[in-house]
Image (tube, coloured by chain):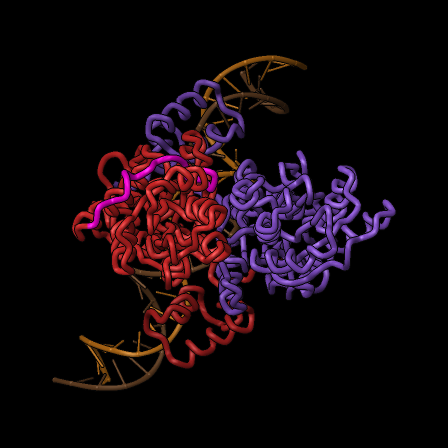
Chain colours: A purple, B red, C orange, D brown
Amino acid sequence: MRRVTIKDVAAAAGVSIGTASKALNGQGKLRAETRDRVAQAAERLGFAPNTLAQALLAGRSYTVGLITTDSFGRFSIPVMLGAEDALGTGLISVFMCDTRDDPDRERRYIEMLTARRVDGLIVTGRRIEPRPAVQADPNIPVVYAMTQPDGEGAAVLPDDQGGGRIAAEHLIAIGRRRVAHITGPERFLAARLRARGFQAALGAAGVESCGAARFGEWSERWGREAAGQLLADRPDAIFCGNDQIARGVADTLRAVGRRIPEDVALVGFDNWAPMALGALPPLSSVDMRLEEVGRVAAEHLLAAIGGERLRGVHKVPSQLVVRESSGG
Amino acid sequence: MRRVTIKDVAAAAGVSIGTASKALNGQGKLRAETRDRVAQAAERLGFAPNTLAQALLAGRSYTVGLITTDSFGRFSIPVMLGAEDALGTGLISVFMCDTRDDPDRERRYIEMLTARRVDGLIVTGRRIEPRPAVQADPNIPVVYAMTQPDGEGAAVLPDDQGGGRIAAEHLIAIGRRRVAHITGPERFLAARLRARGFQAALGAAGVESCGAARFGEWSERWGREAAGQLLADRPDAIFCGNDQIARGVADTLRAVGRRIPEDVALVGFDNWAPMALGALPPLSSVDMRLEEVGRVAAEHLLAAIGGERLRGVHKVPSQLVVRESSGG
DNA sequence: CCATTCAAGGAATAGCTTTTCCTAGATGAG
DNA sequence: CTCATCTAGGAAAAGCTATTCCTTGAATGG
């Protein structure tokens, strides 16, 4: 039950293994008839070259490691899919590694991936704040996606600030003038950036913010609570730091009889389908295009593997998806 | 900038490469002093054996392929994490492959994984109904997780029927006697099994079901709608086929002033944290223990790689997580 | 003192593919 | 007819490790 090797193909075609290899790869000088004979033998025997042998010879494995600290949750998954997409078409396979936020696990994974001679590493996370750089062999290129390293290095991030901006522009465009912001903990860089972009766009349009940004948690509970506090200010639009907060806000508004979007327009963030679509009414939401983040990260990694020297942070523009909660 | 190989270690330690290999692997007859010298040289040079070369020689790669048709969504992810967990401790790495439900992509992935000489395959999906078996080399073991093959083969599934049963038992135990069921489309095997387990447990306890199971969609919208239809029957408990339906039901109940859990107890399914915890009140829910499904699948695969012959379907018991919506 | 055994480590092979270099035969030119 | 050139394909090396078999020197037994 041995695997069929190029040796078997060569024997079946009555040529040497070198010739068989050339025939299959279109190399060297061979008669067309010989090429055909080898190709047919390979076909008949179901030959597929052993990637391990190719990799050993080529000095690279056509694999990359994908490291996440996120247990592949909400954010890593789309990034991962985008990355896999970009790599898969280039015929590079992905090793999946979940560090569970344990530096020791991370170290072991990196050693393992190095021993497997991966061509590169993609590191993803659930927060965009700088994290300690991974300690990898310096000639293995690394790209960070949805997270960034402490020192220098290449990173691809969503544009949170831009996301805040387009949310504000949208609410202004539909005529709202008493616009509030409820979001997650201030210690999250993403929360601060979204708030900053939002406020800046309001300022640029000459619209006054309805109170300062309210920082709290990323939960529905906080959305319900903050919306209650905000009611006295009579906002006609609320921009929420994520979709869960927006759902909490919607709950409170409905409970006190404020109509969405007629009385208060609502915009969420993340465009997390089950949350945004299931809400009553379905939520407008800023989409960070995480798949695109992953795709771009993978493309940068491919470039780096190809020898290009890259660094710095690349931001992927966010996109507003308008649904009923802001008037669609 | 070449990678350090065992040749370098051997040279540094002043021995042959065979001896160096034996020293590092504890094989052969060597003086303790020699072993130490080699170990120190390896340490100093930062040597790690090239896994590709080892794999080529051993005829196996210590990798497995993880194939999903689910775009790594709600269900595959926990399965995948469990699997990675079980494999990682056995020092097997995982190739991630997302077929996007495209049979052609699946075929290409399988070819690729075969060429990479994976030791085995795990196939996961988002539905438990039988699917066409993957067309892999017959001496690569395959285990299905959260899905099962058409013909024979090893599969690990959640126990949907048992999940329905424990939901019913719980509602009966807290004294409910007018118990209804709202769930997803009847064409889903999981929906039918959950309903069957639920009804059977009611019957066994001599409790009459409050109307037949209502099949519909897996959405909040359907939950809201079905709850409205159900109100006339005055149920004192509703078991929902997933957490999204349960949230929809809760919305409607709240809207008409029925208290949860005092007037109507609610139990969902999936125990999807952001849904179940964010709900008002937080949902009791049946947890399929998908990580365990993945872990068991991986363990079965390891056994199969080790030469054991396994087949048949293994079901992982579900677990009820009680929260406020059913009285906790 | 010689023959045998043992300890320690070296040499070579296998695993599979690709590529470089080389050879044998054929063809063309002079 | 001889030499140069070309064509088609073979032989061998490289990539790295683990293992089997072999060699050398020392030690032991008779």
Report the side of B210 relative to A137 (left or right): left
Relative height, residue B31 to residue A60 (above, below): below
User: Residue A267's x, y, as percent?
Assistant: 67, 45
Q: Is residue A127 positioned above or below A260 on the image?
A: below
Give the vertical position of B170 relative to B225 (above or below).
Answer: below
Asked if residue B304 shows in the view, the reply is no
Residue under the point 61% across and 62% down: A217
Q: Which x, y percent locates residue B212?
A: 27, 38
Is residue A85 found inside the magenta-colored segment of the image? no
One can see residue B282 in this view: yes
What secondary structure characterizes most of the magenta part? loop
Residue A6 falls in which quadrant of the image?
top left
Q: Which residues are magenta?
A: B207-221
Q: Residue at x 40, y 26 (%)?
A: A38
In this rendered view, identify the residue nearer to me: A196 or B40: A196
Which is more toward the observer, A102 or A106?
Answer: A102
Residue at horizontal 43%, vertical 34%? B101
Q: Quadrant of the C terminus of chain A?
A: top right
- Name the quadrant of the N terminus of chain A: top left
Query: Residue A234 versus residue B170: which sits nearer the camera?
Result: A234
Is residue B266 toward the left or the right of residue B154 in the image?
right
Return the x and y of residue B180 as percentages of the image width and height.
31, 45
Residue A26 at what x, y percent from top left?
A: 52, 28
Tag count? 0
Is B213 one of the magenta-colored residues?
yes
Quarter of the image for residue B223 reads top left
